[in-house]
Every structure is written in structure tokens, then in C-alpha cells.
Amino acid sequence: MPVPDEEAFRAQVRRWLAANLTGEFAPLVGTGGPGREHEFVAKRMAWERCLGDGGWIGLGWPESDGGRGLPWAHQAIFHEEYARAGAPGRVGHIGEQLLGPTLLMFGTSEQRARFLPGILAGTQLWCQGYSEPGAGSDLAGVTTRARLDGGEWHLDGQKVWTSLAHVADWCFVLARTDPAAERHRGLSYLLVPMHQPGIEVRPIVQLTGTSEFNEVFFDDARAAAEDVVGAVGDGWRVAMGTLAVERGVSTFGQQLAYQREFDAVLKTARATGAIDDPDLAARVVEAWIGLQVMRYTTLATLTPAAGPPTGTEPNVAKLIWGPWHQRLGELAVDVAGAAATTVGPGYELDDAQRLLLFSRAETIYGGSSEIQRTVIAERKLGLPRDPR
């Protein structure tokens, strides 16, 4: 299928979003996303199916696997226009952006044929089973175990900070299948159905008062013997492959959402007169500069002229946007002044307050800033490893 002209494709995306974010989906505009995953969950699941029907999932996947085979520039256009239209936070993000690309890299043809169609159709939702109470940024320390018995994997253990586990149909789980092996060795990447007696999901109440993260407990949960991605014991390599694609072209949409948040902060600063304070004005300028740094860093990473990826690009991106977003949250409430100290009935937060509170976690989840610096230092700069 020929690749459409970029501007023609942008116009096509805009038309489709304008035509479909109406009627039953009109209330979804501006909802969902980080800190707001509790909003309109059922309706956003229906929206995911609408995206699937329209062919807007898996834009960059090979046509042979059901995708549209579009280059990264077209994918970036879609994510930009999606954010510009205020379309809702994606409940299918983990399946499309994480599990799908992982199966394309490491999965068997049977696994791709079995799992990719549900993601493409928006009918099958996934969550990620990585972090544990004793193994967050130190992912190699996972203790959830899986043993093969009777043609099935039997899982026991606990995962934590599992986004959307309460609505997911499946979970990709990093589990220890060889207890005698050390750390990175002996791990396997398993595909586990969520709707079974051996799994319990408990919501975690956040600073925002909502619960989009969960604890997941496995008590002799089952997975089919063939539902291991890559070789048994090679889970670390597969898991790192997932993390490598975690922050791809969708970051353009993320950055446009950040632009909207910045615009709201600037508008408030002007309305309250905070912009006349030299210190606050300087912080507004610094926030704008940070936005440009993120955009050009992403462009440099995805442009072919940048050369082959080094594997540390996601770490650099995370190290930039996590602290930046936290500073924006602090700035948002500072320019609002006294109004930022009150909340509505039922502990209802405004956008600035939600931004401040939710962003506190962003230098921790997905790998803490300390871990990102260590990975960059060792893998990109070749500095000596810390003593173990």
C-alpha cells in the first residue's frame, strides 16, 4: 500500500478525529491519561474498539502482521493530532506500544497470529508485570516464580504499580523460572491471562485520591507452556527489548499534551499577575526551553541521520521529561497562588493540583532517575560499573 503524503495524512487524521469524537464519545475529550485513568473507563474501552475499526492502531507495524507499515513521521503525526484533538488517554497503550512491538521482535509466528489481532482491534487489553515490592528499578531482583508442570506454567508472587491491571485481559510477566540462576539469568517473559482464580488485583490509592495502579498477586496462577516470549531463561533480553520501545513516536503526543499543560500554566500566570514576578517569569521561560529540548531530542533520536540506536535513548528521554514535568507541576500551583491550596467537595482536584501530585512519582516509576543515570553512564559513556 502506498504511503500517503504527510500533510494529506495529517488532514485525514484530523477529519477522522473530528468526525468520531462526537455523540457518545464527545464526553471523552480531555479525559484519561496519567493521573486520570479512572475517568470513563468503559467508554474509553469502547473508544479503543472504535480506533481499531478505523485502522488507527498499529500504524507502524508490518502489513504482514495486520499493521499499516507507516514510517515514523506518519506515526508521529497521528500522535500529535490525537493529543491536539484532546482525544482520551489510551487504555490500549500497553498492548500497542509495549507488548505488540515485543512480539514483533521476539514472538513466534503463532504468538503474533494469536495476540496481535486483538490489540489491533482494540478488544484485548494488556498490563505489564515487572515491578515488585523488592524489585522496582532493580528489575533483575524479581522474585515472582514460575515452574513448568503438566504443560502449564504455575506462577506465585506479587507485582506492584501495575497500570490498568483492573481492566486488563492479559499481563506480560517477568518471572524467575530458574531459582538457582543469578539475577539476570533464569528469567522468562510469560503471557498470563488475568481472568482466572489464581490472580487477585488490589488497587493502590494515590496522592490524587484515585487508583490507576494496582498490586497483583499470583497464587498458583496458570499460563500455557507455549506462552513464553523468546527462549525460557532469556526473559531479561526480551524485557529490555520491551523497555527499549516504551518511549517511541508516542512521545510526540506526550509532548503536545505537555505543551497544553504549559499553555495553561502561562495563561494562569498572566491572569494572576504571577508573570510579573521575575523569579516566576524565569521559571516559565525555563519550562518553555525544556519543552523544546524534549522535542528536538526526540527528533534527533528518531531521525535516520542520527545513526543506529545505542539502547540508552529511552533512558535519556525519561531523565529529561520526568524532572521537567515535576517542575512544571510545582510552577502550576505557584502561579495559581492561594487558589491552589483549596480543593472541591469530595477531594476534587483541579488540573494544576493533579499535575503537582501525580508528577511526584515520575522520577520513580519506569525506572528512577538514579537508575537512568547509571544506565547512561555505564552503557553509553562506558564509565566503570558501581561495585556490587
Image (cartoon, rainbow, N blue to C red):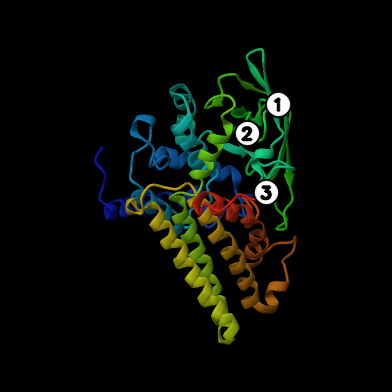
Residue 314 spot, x, y in % from top left: 51, 51
Q: Earlier in the sequence, mark 1 or mark 3?
A: 1
**Secondary structure at numbered mark 3:** loop
Q: Is residue 379 visible?
A: yes
In this view, 88 is above or below 323: above
Q: Is residue 36 left or right of residue 100?
A: right
Q: Tell me the kind of residue under disc 1.
A: Ala
In this view, 103 is above or below 363: above
Q: Tell me the kind of residue under disc 2.
A: Leu
Distance from Cα at disc 2 to Cα at disc 1: 16 Å
Q: Disc 3 marks which residue? A: 387
Q: Nearer the viewer, mark 2 or mark 1?
A: 1
Q: Quadrant of residue 194?
A: top right
Q: Which mark is residue 74?
A: none
Q: Which mark is residue 174?
A: 2
Q: Is residue 271 visible?
A: no
- Give the quadrant of the N terminus: top left
Taking the spot 38% from the left edge, 30% from the top edge, the residue there is 65
Q: Tell me the kind of residue under disc 3.
A: Pro
- Give the quadrant of the C terminus: top right
Whether pointer 1 and pointer 3 mark residues with C-beta atoms closer than 8 Å, the reply is no
Residue 174 spot, x, y in % from top left: 62, 34
Whether pointer 3 and pointer 2 mark residues with C-beta atoms closer than 8 Å, the reply is no
Q: Disc 1 marks which residue? A: 180
Distance from Cα at disc 3 to Cα at disc 2: 25 Å
Residues 333 and 344: in front is 333
**Secondary structure at numbered mark 1:** loop
In this view, 197 is above or below 71: above
